[in-house]
Amino acid sequence: MKKQYELPYNFSYDFIPKLSRKRELFSYIRCIYLPAWKEDAVSTRQGIENREEYPKTYEEYVLRLKCLQQLGLPLCVLMQRDATLDALEKYYNLGIRIFTISEDALAIAAKSRHPEISVTLSITSVLTKEDIQSRDLSMYDHIVLFYWFSRHLDALRNLPKKYRYILIPNTDCYWNCKWHDAHWFATSREEERAATSLCRKCVHDMQDTSFIEPENLSYFDPYIDSYKLVDRLNTTDQILTDLERYASRNTGAQKREEAYFNVD
């Protein structure tokens, strides 16, 4: 069964025209995700707000969002910290029906007001296997799994079947990174570089990362509803190339032994 991918929007001016010329990839896109306007909620990868092409005003942000909607693909807005129901309502009124959040109370309130929306639990919750097995997460339509599961296939197999899971396959972060918040929410380049340095010290070869080659997603497909591609700091060409590689699953990478995806 064909799997779909969440695709990052990088706010580059060339994103919409280049993606519009790749109609053959549209069926592989579950949604395009983008952060809420910087004053409405704190979202991952704050560095994108310092880019020259990031909208200068909320009105410009809304215009970009409406241009994305013209592609005819679902959009997902990230509202990962300090988000409120009133803020979420603004995006609902703009036609957004998929939200990625990290607060159970907000998920419950949002689904109560708008039962038709889809709510995804953000990776920033960093759920463990035990968390997923013991907590009530029924207020979420999807759960983005932490990197740890990319190297613990057997644990993934034993997660509750009642939930739908999303996995990120194309990050080279350490599979059990302890500096994830600094990666995601760094307020300066220095802070992010420090986190990256600590993470890189744990990486000696590819198996130490959470990266999964497209050819090896078949191990994960039975337990994963869809996949999420990163990174919003990449160029448009990089983002679309990654989507093509994962959609085709044919990049010339070796087929790993199953044990590769179960580390001690």
Image (cartoon, helix red, strand yellow):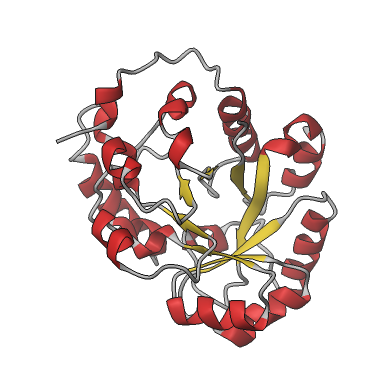
For residue 29, above or below residue 120:
above
Quadrant, the C terminus: top left
Relative image position of residue 109 (x, y in whole percent): 56, 83
Number of labelled discs? 0
Picture residue at 46% right of the left edge, 26% below the top:
218
The answer to whether one can see residue 165 in this image is yes
The residue furthest left is 264
Picture residue at 66% right of the left edge, 51% below the top:
32
Along the line of sight, which residue is nearer the eye, 58 or 5? 5
Picture residue at 47% right of the left edge, 21% below the top:
215
The answer to whether one can see residue 170 in this image is no
Quadrant, the N terminus: top right
Q: Quadrant of residue 136?
A: bottom left
Relative image position of residue 60 (x, y in whole percent): 76, 68
Q: Quadrant of residue 21?
A: top right
For residue 243, above or below residue 164:
above
The residue furthest right is 70
Picture residue at 23% right of the left edge, 55% below the top:
178
Along the line of sight, which residue is nearer the eye, 241 or 210? 210
Along the line of sight, which residue is nearer the eye, 80 or 166? 166
Relative image position of residue 36 (x, y in whole percent): 61, 69
For residue 36, above or below residue 4:
below
